[in-house]
Image (tube, rainbow, N blue to C red):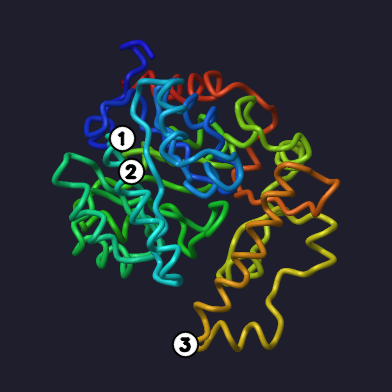
Amino acid sequence: MNEKTRYETEFTRALNIDIPLICGAMYPCSNPELVAAVSEAGGIGIVQPLSLSYVHGYDFREGLRYIRSLTKKPIGVNLIIEKSSKKYLQRVHEWLDISLEEKIPFFVTALGNPKWVVDKAKPVGATIYHDATNRKWAEKALDGGVNGFICVNNRAGGHAGDLSPQQLLEDLTPLGKPLICAGGIGSPEAFADATDMGYAGVQMGTRFIASKECNAHPDYKNAILNANEKDIVLTDKISGVPVSIIKTPHIERMGTKAGFIAKKLLRGRKTKHWMRMFYTLQSLVSLKKASMQGMNYKDFFQAGKSVEGIHEVKSVAEIVGEYAKSLDSKA
């Protein structure tokens, strides 16, 4: 990325990257080559640990080193820190320790209190942002000492929020931390609009699935190209909380809502974590197979409303270059 297209915000300065553009962590689509390509192009790619190990077959440390062999630029790691499973949380602690040993400079935390991550990572100079869907959860993470927030809005793929990008910006700006817009960004124009609005950067996922470096099945990429935002529906059958997916014939047959017993268990204080774990274990297999096998399996494709602006599979360098160019006049 040349100096002309470098666009500085508090976020880019903290990480020493050229463009305020994150490739969000995606299960199962965050293959190492995609993560590295986004960083190499001037943004920052985020590692999804389960995707790196369970889907793509890497030992976590060796996977990080492989990505580092592809780019010397900063990369980040996503840590889901919800206390639903002691065994899983132990693995998260291990991933954090390994990441710090490998000098990862950026962490994105989600679904829990990030204080323990901050306490370990901040003293060695790492930057920590936390996923937030509303002010209540952002304030809790702020008390934990995070540096900024990934503002997950109602247009996002995966675990979407309830609020619009504008509403989230207005609600979280008073907290005084850099904010990243996550959801609905599928074109350079939308990227520029988000920064004009006041966001310090943008996180994208769906746009990068439809890239040459992402090794998702062509059926998945074509489903993104052929969909519009009305084809994006919410289902609670993946993790027990609403997740954005593409409405396909398989989804129409199976439905998007949890059954009566599942709903009752999801509402219980003691049973909700077990039900979420049950759904998550099932979906880990289904999402992996759909991504790798395409329509030969269940057409189970996560995506956000940004599909509206995605019409072609391009290289990561082309995508980031187009988005960077949209900021040229402001650089």
Name which residue lies at 49% across and 24% down: 37
Which secondary structure, mark 3? loop
Q: What residue did someone put label 3 on?
A: 270
Quadrant assignment for the C terminus:
top left
The amino acid beneath tag 3 is: Lys
Left/right of residue 296 with respect to residue 210 in the rendered view: right
Residue 49 picture location, percent across and down: 47, 47
Say above or below: 111 vs 39.
Answer: below
Which secondary structure, mark 2? helix
Q: Residues within 10 Å of mark 2 (few under 14, many from 20)?
A: some
The amino acid beneath tag 2 is: Ile
N-terminal of the two: label 2 or label 3? 2
Numbered badge on residue 219 = none
Name which residue lies at 18% across and 55% down: 119
State the CA–CA distance, disc 1 to disc 3. Answer: 37 Å
Q: What residue did someone put label 1 on?
A: 102
Say above or below: 270 vs 275.
Answer: below
* CB-based contact (under 8 Å), mark 2 and mark 1: yes
Name which residue lies at 55% across and 19% down: 318
Q: What residue did someone put label 2 on?
A: 98
Rendered image quadrant of residue 10:
top left
Residue 156 picture location, percent across and down: 53, 52
Of marks 2 and 3, the one in the foreground: 2
